[in-house]
Amino acid sequence: MDSAAVDQFEAGRSRLASLAYRLLGSAADAEDAVQDTFLRWQAADREQIQVPEAWLTKVTTNLCLDRLRSAQARHERTAGAWLPEPLLDGDPMLGPADTFEQRESVTLAVLTLLERLSPAERAVYVLREAFSYSHAEIAAILDVTEAASQQHAHRARTRVAAERRRGGAADPASARRVVEEFLAAATSGRTDRLVALLTDDVTAVSDGAGLARRLLRYRSRERVASFVRAGFKATPAKRRLAGGSLAMHLARVNGTLAVVAVVGGRVVGAVAFEISDGKVASLCGIAATDRLARLDEAWQHHEPGVPVIDAW
């Protein structure tokens, strides 16, 4: 392959990776899909490709759909043990963040909701909301009619909206204040204050410190508060499991505020928050090692500042 063709592909690699990540929810799988796209680009008769960007988008999208439709992926994702891979803000795989729709499409909460869509609905939602493709362009990418693209988009938006009846998003300073109050209540045992900091329709999902065979899901303020209180209660057994005493930092992960747990400079867990109207609307806790690899790698080059809890 000539250097011009390589350069042409590399110029769009970040965009393709961002697309693949939103479709798959996994940075590792997204990288594999983009590399497979490169191999197809390498083997293609490029003189017959009139619009390289459209061709590359189509190939990447359909490779991702093949992965989502595979028997193994269907089993893993329906077994109740799958969560998106968290990424530290600034990671190029998070992609465009100029509009509200682009920022929302990459949050852990929305990536988790997208698991409830069919692969086609998920692809249309991502292409439309995050990358602003027209229905005509989406129809060409997916080999469907424009009417089918519109129907997929309508169903996807309806299903996502039904789970996201939220108030206005908090500004960074307000969100930080809410999360700091939340941590203080969670680590002190003030369950009443913890309940007061949760929205009426709060939800929580966790992989059980990376040990649970199925995801742990909680609804209602009382159940979420009880789960959080137990999870943030420090014990010698938890410290042994984590590999030592934890420091907890606040950072932005997938566009929302998160608590990142660190032992000896190594990320061992993350809890992402969504804040709505001054309260916590959802939590997503991830501690499985394979889900944290890219976040941990980015953390090694991150300046975290003073931890909110320096010895848990």
Image (cartoon, rainbow, N blue to C red):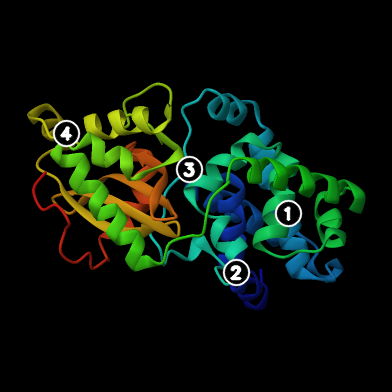
Q: Nearer the viewer, mark 4 or mark 3?
A: 4
Q: CA distance from mark 1 to mark 2?
A: 25 Å
Q: CA distance from mark 2 to mark 3?
A: 21 Å
Amino acid type, callout 1: Val
Task: Give the crowd class for mark 2: few <14, some 14-19, many >=20 residues within 10 Å.
Answer: few
Task: Give the crowd class for mark 1: few <14, some 14-19, many >=20 residues within 10 Å.
Answer: many
Rendered residue at 41%/49% (across/down) = 86
Rendered residue at 50%/61% (across/down) = 93
Taking the view exactly as shown, the residue that stands out farthest to the bottom is 4
Judge whether residue 43 can be spotted in this image: no
Task: Answer with left or right where residue 27 lies relative to residue 259.
Answer: right
Amino acid type, callout 4: Lys
Q: CA distance from mark 3 to mark 1?
A: 22 Å
Q: Which residue is mark 3?
A: 84
| Numbered circle sitting on residue 233 | 4
Q: Secondary structure at mark 1?
A: helix
Mark 1 / mark 4, whichever is N-terminal: 1
Q: Is 290 rendered above or below residue 104?
A: above
Mark 3 / mark 1, whichever is N-terminal: 1
Mark 2 / mark 4, whichever is N-terminal: 2
| Numbered circle sitting on residue 99 | 2
Q: Secondary structure at mark 4?
A: loop
